[in-house]
Image (spheres, helix red, strand yellow):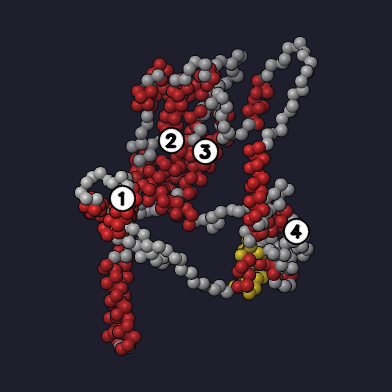
């Protein structure tokens, strides 16, 4: 950072150290877009109390404290402690602030019919009976929809009830029951009696009521959580299971959304109007303008000369420059199928860990059943790891690498380490998850069957039957896709002719989880 901060006064103060470099400009751009301010530079201090990194005669300011601009008035001081260090040669930056709590404004809400009570059998049965009586006992509704809707709403109000329309307080009271309510009332009465009498007997009575209330609250919480996790293990609780995983994932994030849009020159846009204008320009160019291409000149000269054929070296060089994960062409074959799949395997492992971290708050909860954890793993994590591998000829080492990553995730989920000396088979049987290699083989054979069922002119089928001219190198040859498919078909006991019968082939290659 530097003292010359013209144009950046809204995020920087007047008291910086040295010149601003590229990393410093990134901090300034981030603070502008997020409407934040660099607190270190708003207070006049000696250089010893401003320098955060000092080594070999070099003094720089590389550690900062950022806050919302609306909270600057609550910050009283910010400085560096010279004698202390957090990391090597990095000094401690401290900030003193006074936080004020503001009451939320009440949001006006309207009373709503408690339609969610229809999930209960008694409520649903009573609603049907009352609705049939209101419609005159006939099963066929009137032709006038407005009249029918009015009758349905009135019946819902009378049978299901109406909410109060008041905003719920941010309190964890979903586990509250009548026993807890009664114990809390007794505790309040005992506290009021002790405040009035102030004797030893009333104090003992209040302490006993307080212990009973705590015991009842803990009992109610434990019972409510047991019912919650039991419901998550059922078919009706699948939606609640993934909703709970999303909530815990959002709760673990510091910044929910990164708002950073740049203009053509790379400058960060600050106002919402300029951001919207930039999006408008982008979509206008995307939808209405064509890409630059080389224009063919009409009337060119015709050369009667043999065109040189594309060589293998050129094809290999083009494949190496291509990136994985791109859309397939007319042949429906991705670039990952060229045999060089080391990078793709690493990407699949990283994608699996990324999906596992999103649901780690749920999948590592000890109170959730192991079968539910396996269900979440098979739904969220494993599809990310197997994506695109049906066209890849995995080697034994690469397959083992994927299985090792999978076992680490499953052991983390169950809270088991290798020191516990529990075999992988027992871990997989507990969470009901099949081996990764078997699921990859199922995906390969399924994709291979889809290709065989296409017509003979399909380019994907022609590529599978193609034989390149020449001889392979000495030594152990590299595994090709068809080599792996042949081994897979021998393991499951199918042949190429059975690919036409889709139902029978699916039954034979299917590798279900235990």
The mark lying in front, picked from 4 and 3, is 4
**Marks 3/1: CA–CA distance:** 55 Å
Q: Which one is in front, 135 or 229?
A: 135
Q: Position of residue 10 (x, y in %)?
A: 69, 64
**Marks 3/2: CA–CA distance:** 12 Å
**First in sequence: mark 3 or mark 2?**
3
**First in sequence: mark 2 or mark 1?**
1
Instruction: Identify the mark at residue 20; answer none if there is no mark.
Output: 4
The mark lying in front, picked from 3 and 2, is 3
**Marks 4/1: CA–CA distance:** 70 Å
- Residue 180 drawn above or below residue 334: below
Query: Which image quarter is the N terminus in?
Result: bottom right
Q: Secondary structure at mark 3?
A: helix
Q: Position of residue 34 (x, y in %)?
A: 62, 59
Q: Which one is in front, 204 or 167?
A: 167
Q: Secondary structure at mark 1?
A: helix
Asked whether the beta carbons under mark 4 and mark 1 sit within 8 Å of each other, the answer is: no
């Amino acid at each position: 950072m530097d003292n010359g901060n013209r144009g950046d006064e809204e995020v920087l103060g007047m008291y910086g150290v040295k010149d601003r470099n590229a990393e410093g400009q990134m901090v300034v751009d981030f603070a502008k877009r997020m409407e934040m301010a660099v607190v270190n530079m708003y207070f006049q201090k000696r250089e010893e109390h401003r320098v955060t990194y000092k080594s070999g005669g070099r003094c720089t300011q590389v550690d900062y404290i950022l806050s919302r601009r609306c909270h600057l008035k609550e910050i009283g001081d910010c400085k560096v402690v010279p004698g202390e260090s957090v990391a090597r040669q990095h000094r401690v930056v401290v900030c003193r602030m006074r936080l004020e709590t503001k009451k939320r404004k009440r949001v006006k809400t309207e009373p709503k019919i408690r339609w969610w009570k229809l999930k209960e059998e008694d409520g649903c049965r009573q609603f049907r009976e009352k609705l049939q009586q209101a419609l005159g006992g006939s099963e066929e509704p009137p032709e006038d929809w407005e009249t029918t809707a009015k009758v349905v709403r009135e019946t819902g109000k009378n049978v299901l009830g109406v909410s109060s329309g008041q905003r719920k307080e941010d309190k964890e009271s979903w586990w509250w029951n009548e026993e807890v309510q009664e114990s809390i009332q007794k505790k309040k009465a005992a506290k009021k009696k002790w405040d009035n009498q102030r004797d030893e007997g009333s104090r003992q009575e209040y302490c006993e009521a307080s212990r009973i209330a705590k015991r009842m609250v803990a009992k109610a919480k434990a019972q409510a959580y047991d019912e919650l996790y039991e419901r998550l293990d059922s078919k009706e609780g699948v939606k609640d299971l993934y909703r709970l995983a999303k909530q815990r994932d959002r709760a673990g994030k510091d910044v929910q959304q990164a708002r950073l849009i740049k203009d053509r020159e790379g400058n960060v846009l600050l106002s919402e109007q300029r951001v919207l204008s930039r999006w408008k320009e982008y979509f206008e160019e995307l939808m209405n303008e064509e890409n630059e291409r080389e224009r063919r000149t009409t009337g060119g000269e015709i050369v009667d000369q043999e065109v040189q054929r594309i060589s293998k070296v050129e094809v290999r060089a083009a494949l190496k420059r291509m990136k994985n994960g791109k859309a397939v062409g007319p042949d429906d074959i991705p670039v990952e199928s060229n045999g060089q799949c080391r990078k793709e395997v690493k990407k699949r492992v990283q994608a699996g860990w990324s999906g596992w971290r999103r649901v780690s708050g749920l999948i590592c909860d000890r109170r959730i059943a192991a079968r539910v954890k396996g269900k979440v793993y098979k739904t969220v994590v494993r599809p990310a790891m197997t994506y695109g591998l049906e066209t890849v000829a995995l080697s034994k080492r690469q397959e083992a690498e994927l299985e090792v990553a999978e076992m680490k995730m499953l052991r983390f989920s169950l809270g088991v380490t290798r020191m516990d000396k529990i075999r992988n088979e027992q871990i997989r049987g507990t969470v009901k998850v099949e081996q990764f290699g078997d699921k990859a083989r199922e995906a390969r054979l399924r994709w291979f069957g889809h290709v065989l069922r296409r017509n003979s002119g399909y380019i994907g089928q022609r590529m599978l039957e193609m034989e390149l001219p020449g001889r392979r190198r000495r030594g152990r040859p590299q595994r090709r896709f068809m080599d792996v498919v042949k081994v897979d078909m021998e393991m499951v006991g199918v042949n190429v002719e059975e690919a036409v019968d889709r139902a029978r082939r699916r039954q034979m290659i299917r590798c279900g989880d235990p």
